[in-house]
Image (spheres, rainbow, N blue to C red):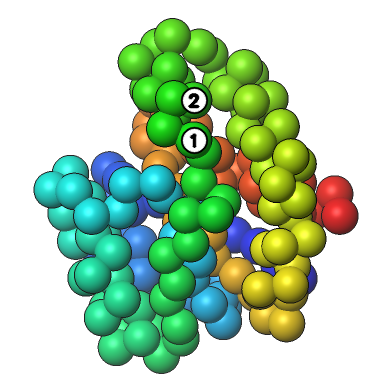
Amino acid sequence: MKIVTVSPYETSAADFFKEIQEAKAEIVVDVRLHASNQLCGYSKEGDLAYFVPAILKIPYVHDTRFAPKEELLKSYISGGCGFERYREGYAQEIQAKEGISTFLKAYGSYQSIAIIGTATKKRRSHAEVLKGLLEEK
């Protein structure tokens, strides 16, 4: 299974969709906790549910089972914890709910998956942690 992480933040829609297309993704799995607020711009859940199949001809799924808990996310975004603590906390959350086997059951039949996260030029995303955990498996 090939996994690529993509982020719609600080990038154009054209570059975002091109990155997914170049990865030859067969499905887009959005693991953002908040995918419907105004800050999401063109990448709101409802918009991507239309755009991904229309533009890329592949399924789009918003799956919050793989999003961090609200408290952990707020702590990281506000600067209350650094990325290493965030990474460790997120990995513990995923392991506690057997998230890797759940992900593989849901999406393991796909050869190439694009996971949408929240990375910016200044902030890393839990999507890269999820990718690492999946690659370890």
Image point (35%, 62%), residue name: 16
Q: Quadrant of the N terminus?
A: bottom right
Q: Give left or right: position of 94 versus 136.
A: left
Nearer the observer, 43 or 70: 70
Q: Residue furthest right?
A: 137
Disc 2 target residue: 72
Residue 50 appears anywhere in the view: yes
Nearer the observer, 78 or 26: 78
Q: Amino acid at mark 1?
A: Lys
Q: Residue 92, image x and y in percent?
A: 71, 32
Q: Residue furthest front?
A: 97
Q: Quadrant of the C terminus?
A: bottom right
Disc 1 target residue: 69
Q: Residue furthest left?
A: 38
Are there few (<14), some (14-19), or many (20+) residues within 10 Å of tag 1? some
Image point (51%, 38%), residue name: 68
Q: Residue 84, image x and y in percent?
A: 63, 19
Q: Residue furthest top?
A: 80
Residue 14 appears anywhere in the view: no
Q: Amino acid at mark 2?
A: Leu
Image point (68%, 63%), residue name: 103
Image point (53%, 59%), residue name: 115
Q: SS of the residue at dot 2? A: helix
Q: Residue 48, image x and y in percent?
A: 29, 71
| Contact check, label 2 and label 1, Cβ < 8 Å | yes
Q: SS of the residue at dot 1? A: loop
Q: Residue 11, image x and y in percent?
A: 29, 50
